[in-house]
Structures are given as C-alpha cells and as structure tokens.
Image: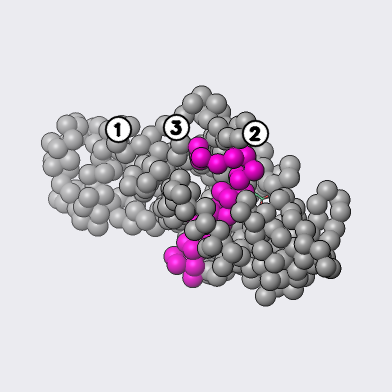
Amino acid sequence: MHNSIEPHCSRYRLFEFLAESEGEYVQGSVLTKKLGFSRQALFKHICSLREEGFDIGSLPQKGYMLKNIRETDAISETILDFLLRDIPLFSKSIYFPSITSTQHAIKRLAQQDAPEGIVAVTDEQTEGRGRRGRSWHAPASKDLLFSLLLRPELRPGDVQLLNLAAGLAVKSVLKEEYQVDAKLKWPNDLLANGRKICGILSEAAGEPDRIYYAVTGIGINVNFTEEEMSEEVRDIATSINIEKGHPVPRPFLLSRVLYSLSSYVMDLKKSDGKEKLLFSYRKECDTIGSDILVTQDEESFTGTAVGITEQGALVVKVGEQEMIFAAADVHHLRMR
Ligand code: BTN
C-alpha cells in the first residue's frame, strides 16, 4: 500500500520533485544532487516513469521536464499517490493491473483490520461484481473501477446511504468537470441520456446493530466508444467519451470523485450528516416523482416514486397504498 506521507520509493521522490516544476526543465545535475541519485539511477527512474505513462521531455542542455500530469490516463501507483495525496480520508491506494474484483481486495484488507479510507483501483476485473449477484463487465483499461474501505458509524440497514452518497459524488463530478448531466436512478445507477454511465455497489459486514466495515465499489464507464461496445449493451450503456466526444484521463477523474465523496462520508459521522445527505439525494434523484416499474423477488409493481426513507429505501405509491422497497430493480416508465 502507498501513501504520500511515506513516499514509497526513489522513483516517487523524483516524480514529486519534477511535479513541483511541472512544465519546466530541471537540470539532471540538480536532480542527482537534491535526490542523492547517481546519473544511472536517475536515467533508470526516468525510464520507469515514462513506462508508467508520464510525459517526460528531455533536452541535453536543459535536463528533464514533466508535463500534463492531470492528462495522464495510465493508472499507476505513482499517479495515485500524487493525485490522492491531499484527499481527506482517501489518500491511501493500492493498484492492481488486473484482479478478480476490487471488492474482494478491499474485503481482504478489511478482515486484516486495515484502516478506513483505502482505495483499491484496477484496470481489469476478471470477476467484476454488480448488484444482486450479477456480474459487471468492463473492457480493460477503459473504465474507472475502484472500491473503498469504509468504517461508518451506521447500522447494517443504513448501508444504502453509502450508495446515495457515492451517486451524488459521481453525479456532481460528471457535471462540474465534464459537463455530463447524468441522472440519479434509485438505488444506485447514473444514467446519461437514458444509458448507464456508472454503477455502485455497497456491501457490509457486521452485527445487527453495527457495521464492522463496508465496501463501496464504483464502476464508471469512461473511455470506450460506441464501436467498442458489444451489441447487447449498446442500447443500455454509455461512457464519458461517448457523451463528450473525447476520452478523459481516469486518475484525475478518480481524484475528483474521491474528493467529493470524502465530504459526504465525513458528514455522515456528524449528527446532522444523514439528514443533509438525504436532503441532497431527495432533491437530485430523478426517480422521485417518476412513474416506475419496480421488481423485487420476481414480483413487479407499477406506481409513482414519492420519496426516500431515512434508510435510503424507495417509497412508491401503488394505487392507494404506499410501499417501501429497500432493494429492488427500478425501470422508469418515462424518462423525465
Ligand atoms: C451495479 O450497477 O450493478 C453495480 C456495479 C458496481 C461495479 C463496481 S466496479 C468496481 C467494483 N468492483 C466490482 O466487482 N464491482 C464494483
């Protein structure tokens, strides 16, 4: 695991030094002197950083220049440590080029008593998990796939609140950073122009009255194109690339989402935190006020979504009756 408080290696120290002068040349002699490297070691670390995907120019008389850090799409330990270094709660990360599921990685760490806030990020999942035991497929190196270790002061019945917080965080970042106006669909989907752009899954372990840990996993469809999508998902999935017309760098997106989510999660520890979260979600959720078809345990109901309970469950008016759904699949009958 890595974090910025204990830089994990010489390569990272070199990166930080170059990052402080981003867009400017730094003499090789300055780098070797300040960092205590030999010329050979410096060259080796520069090559490794380039292999990690960084844009590092070099000129014989001028030295080395690191450019466009926030435009880097390649995910690496170095970029994660750097971009997450000042994020409250989520500054420690672990990167897997490929893994079964980031949910598994975080669960393992949680069971070993790892502290709250660790982020597991991957480029590829071989057993990606979706809600209700479904699988989650994502093309390698195109999407942002990550899970977070949380230790909230919540009861197991309140876990849905973490999905609501994550949905609000992703929604605000998509809008503010990328001008993608995604709609929140209860319980935990984000749709852009009616197609899924993000899925969220929170799982928890605990006792009836307290959570030991929760794992919130987020999959954002970032850079795949229409052509790269299989026939069967073409009508139901989209990506930031498709919505905006150009690819966007994933590490920066991750840092923005974590920054936004950290304040929701920290607020949940305060006395009025739940209320604030529910107020924002009720305001932003597109399902509320919509005519919907709800499916739960093989049974379907048609009605109008009228509210969200204190625990994040959906209240639906079915005929004259109000029904509460803690977990269900929702289909909007008309997109608003
Ligand atoms: C859903 O919409 O069904 C939820 C999908 C959640 C997918 C993310 S991708 C990162 C994390 N790892 C997983 O295996 N699943 C979640």
Circle 2 residue? 208
Q: Residue at x 72, y 66 (%)?
A: 305
In front of the other: 164 or 58: 164
Q: CA distance from mark 1 to mark 2?
A: 38 Å
When the figure is inspected, residue 176 is found, relative to residue 85, above or below; the finding is below
Q: Quadrant of the C terminus?
A: bottom right
Q: Residue at x 49, y 63 (%)?
A: 172
In front of the other: 80 or 333: 333
Q: CA distance from mark 3 to mark 2?
A: 22 Å
Judged from the image, the secondary structure of the residue bearing numbered disc 1 is: loop
Magenta part of the chain: 150-179
Specify whether 100 is left or right of 16: right
Judged from the image, the secondary structure of the residue bearing numbered disc 2 is: loop
Circle 3 residue? 115
Circle 1 residue? 6
Q: Quadrant of the N terminus?
A: top left
In which image quadrant can residue 303 be found?
bottom right
Residue 308 placed where, x, y %?
65, 59
Mark 2 sits near ligand 1, with its Cβ under 8 Å away: no
In front of the other: 36 or 200: 200
Residue 160 is covered by the magenta coloring = yes
When the figure is inspected, residue 211 is found, relative to residue 55, above or below; the finding is above
Residue 230 placed where, x, y %?
72, 57
**Pointer 2 local density, CA inside 10 Å: few below 14, some 14–19, many at least 20:** few
**Pointer 3 local density, CA inside 10 Å: few below 14, some 14–19, many at least 20:** some
Q: Given the image, on which type of amino acid does mark 1 rest?
A: Glu
Q: CA distance from mark 3 to mark 1?
A: 16 Å
Q: Is residue 5 visible?
A: yes
